[in-house]
Amino acid sequence: MSFDIENDPRLDPRIKAFLQRQPETAVSDVASREALLAEAASPAGVAMLAAEAAFMDLGDDETVAPSAGLSFATREIASSPDANTIVLEIIRPDTDQELACVYYIHGGGMATLSCRYGSYRAWGRIIAARGVVVVMVDFRNAVAPSSVSEVAPFPAGLNDCVAGLRWVHAHAGDLGVDPARIVVSGESGGGNLTLATGLTLARAGDARLARGLYAFCPFIAGRWPDAAYPSSSEYQDLLSDVRSNRGVIGYGVEAYDRRDPLAWPAFATRDDVAGLPPTVISVNECDPLRDEGVAFYRLLLAAGVSARARVILGTTHAIEMYPTVCPELSHDAARDLAAFAAS
């Protein structure tokens, strides 16, 4: 089914213009993870990733997301269990007060992107301006490097996200963070890793380390389109990740085949999610991932988890994380996330 971007009345006109500016991305199937890595390392693949990074940098704007009143720091820490190095970018309001913390995991299908890209820098400032500390983690991507040079499939990125959260909790005093008010958040692939981090902590008996989870447009089904999620067919033209097998091949088809909810949280059962902290699921109306996010929210309710859901009308996938497109939507989302962390 082809989605008519130009004539669909649901889409915000600003988003229509934004979609027309996006760089072309590969959508064909790949035979193996090795083939995908070789493609990403080829001249054409490197050029495509560079164009993606340049496009993301257009999302940074001091007018929309001022730096005034904020302090910035970088930490390189050892992850577990591989003893590899990951990067944490820390944004803090200029105050001596102990503050709540948003531990943020960037998107990119667990495969690409970096929290250092411009749109994420701006998004982090918008959140921090609401009076919370923001810690953004650059983990090991599955396909193309972030600021961390190593790439590795599941569970490497998840291990890094969990290790980074444990570090923030252990160093809360140094960071001026209230250890009882740390929430985990992320969008798309970062939404997957947000939920998977919560599931991992619950399995380990450490759910207390995250006061809550806030997942934007979580990328959790693994294969698309899926008849269980009608949006995955209706809007598949609006997200290249769901028009091929690249997501599951890059991150780990073995984990998909064994239906591992830590890799693909859509496989989670009521028992899996029962130990999760309060959770918010936010989805976009015109997003192929909308219905899998809604289904996860309903699973949370059925399991007795304190949960809330938001549907942002007229929007496409993760548009809130690109603050120069619809600034008021980004500020509204950041306001809700920061309030969730501070409450």
Image (cartoon, helix red, strand yellow):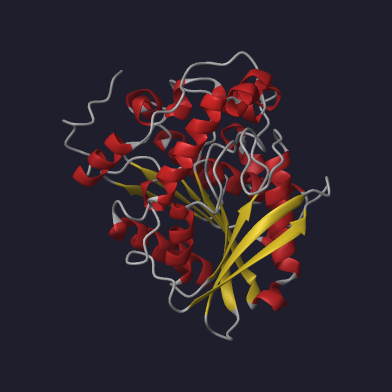
- Decide: is 246 above or below 126: above
Q: Nearer the viewer, residue 277 or 105?
A: 105
Q: Residue at x 38, y 52 (%)?
A: 59
Q: Residue at x 64, y 18 (%)?
A: 35
Q: Nearer the viewer, residue 73 or 250?
A: 73
Q: Nearer the viewer, residue 36 or 276?
A: 36
> Can you tell which quarter of the image residue 253 is in?
top right
> Can you tell which quarter of the image residue 262 is in?
top right
- Decide: is 267 above or below 90: above
Q: Residue at x 48, y 23 (%)?
A: 224
Q: Is residue 251 visible?
A: yes
Q: Residue furthest front?
A: 43
- Please state the horizontal and vertical placement of residue 302, each as a whole percent of the image: 53, 43
- Please state the horizontal and vertical placement of residue 221, each as a whole percent of the image: 53, 30
- Please state the horizontal and vertical placement of residue 18, each as a whole percent of the image: 29, 42
- Please state the horizontal and vertical placement of residue 133, each as a whole percent of the image: 56, 71
- Decide: is 71 above or below 200: below
For the N terminus, give its image quadrant: top left
> Can you tell which quarter of the image residue 285 is in?
top left
Q: Is residue 208 visible?
A: no
- Decide: is 330 above or below 34: below
Q: Is residue 339 left or right of residue 185?
A: left
Q: Residue furthest top?
A: 31
Q: Residue at x 51, y 25 (%)?
A: 44
Q: Nearer the viewer, residue 97 or 120?
A: 120
Label total for image: 0
